Amino acid sequence: MKALEGVRVLDLATLFAGPMAAMLLGDFGAEVVKVEHPVKPDPSRGHGPGGLWWKVLGRNKRAMTLDLSTAEGQRVLLALARDADVVIENFRPGTLERWNLSYDRLREANPRLVLARVTGFGQFGPYARRPGFGTLAEAMSGFAAMTGEPDGPPTLPPFGLADGICALATAYAVMAALHAREGTGAGQVVDMSIIEPILTVLGAQPTIYDRLGVVPPRTGNRSVNNAPRNTYRCADGTWVAVSTSAQNIAERVMRLVGRPEYVQEPWFATGAGRVEHADELDQAVAAWVGARTREEVLDAFERAQAAVAPIYDVRDVMSDPQLAALDAVTTVEDPGLGPLRMQNVMFRLSATPGEIRWPGRPHGADTAAVLAELGLSDADVAALRDKGVV
């Protein structure tokens, strides 16, 4: 048995946050049906080199097409919703209502349905109808303003950070709503904005500003809470990252790099004190690391029980023995491409583990099968195809 076996999800969303949330549910056994427009599929199918992102984002999903702007398409969607537990959508607020698929109408078909609505800024407020992308959330949450070098511009991540965090939050919200349904017998609406989850994980900065008026500065790879904390170049041109969040780790690092006298300084006893001397601490660590290869640095830090990590690119990730032991990057068989390597499910459950049953399927590959399960005949499906509904 899978953890979410029996949970039925309709994924109406496009691009990243909503579809990734559906992917996370599918990873643990939910039956996910991806619903796409007949002629305008999810843009993620063509996103990135070779369109391979879809193979990950679409994994464990059945793929069907349906034009929700048509009356026939709306009737099919309502029929699907009658047996569903969750619908995930990310259209601009008011779009489902314009298509006569408001939550009130969906709830008439299925009072137990959970509707997760993922948008840039939520379902109400002055920005609600603006286009919403993760980049905007990264900019407006405070993330970009505090990321980058002190004398450089605000920095955006080179991947969908806000979307990924929102996907995790959406999956969590859906599970909370499904659990609440066990007590109430009724579904509800999840109103998820992309900006709020990333704002949450940025820490206590609103509270700190409220009480102390402090605006987080850009500090590059340094921390405002402890030092030394940075990236350092090794003699062989590779890089490592060092963290000293714990006092005893900071002491071990300075003894290791040959500067034990710093440990005796009064200012060294706190993270805040060490931050005030970050330049000299960084210089000491950088000089020691820069005289050694990465392998030598890692071996020495491990013997000293100090915190260090190699800075990997994807090639290193694919060959790391710890990640291999966890099967963090696993192999999935694709009918057209053969064995595909991709990230595995994110965690391990001892009794009801998740799995990747198949990678993303072709556009509309399961339309006929899904419609047949609703009781539509071959002639009915052909008629819908002739009208462009599927």
Image (cartoon, grey):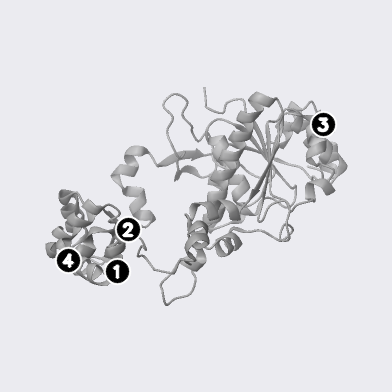
**Residue 369 in the image, given as x and y percentages of width and height:** 71, 31
Which residue is label 1 attached to?
Answer: 276
- For the C terminus, the quadrant is top right
**Residue 49 in the image, given as x and y percentages of width and height:** 52, 58
**Mark closer to the chain start, 4 or 2:** 4
Residue located at (59% from left, 31% from top):
30
Mark 4 → mark 2, Cα distance in angstroms: 17 Å
- Amino acid type shown at disc 4: Trp
Q: Are marks 2 and 1 in contact (CB under 8 Å)?
A: no
**Residue 245 in the image, given as x and y percentages of width and height:** 30, 54
Q: Nearer the viewer, residue 344 or 223?
A: 223
- Amino acid type shown at disc 1: Glu
- Amino acid type shown at disc 2: Ile
Callout 3: SS: helix
Mark 2 → mark 3, Cα distance in angstroms: 53 Å
Please state which of the two labelled residues, at mark 2 or mark 1, is closer to the viewer. 1
Q: Nearer the viewer, residue 356 or 27?
A: 27
**Mark closer to the chain start, 4 or 3:** 3
Residue 53 visible? The answer is: no
Which residue is label 3 attached to?
Answer: 108
Please state which of the two labelled residues, at mark 4 or mark 1, is closer to the viewer. 1
Q: Is residue 227 left or right of residue 339?
A: left
Q: Nearer the viewer, residue 28 or 301?
A: 301
Residue at the extreme bottom of the image, as rendered? 151
Which residue is label 2 attached to?
Answer: 311
**Mark closer to the chain start, 3 or 1:** 3
Which residue is label 4 attached to?
Answer: 288
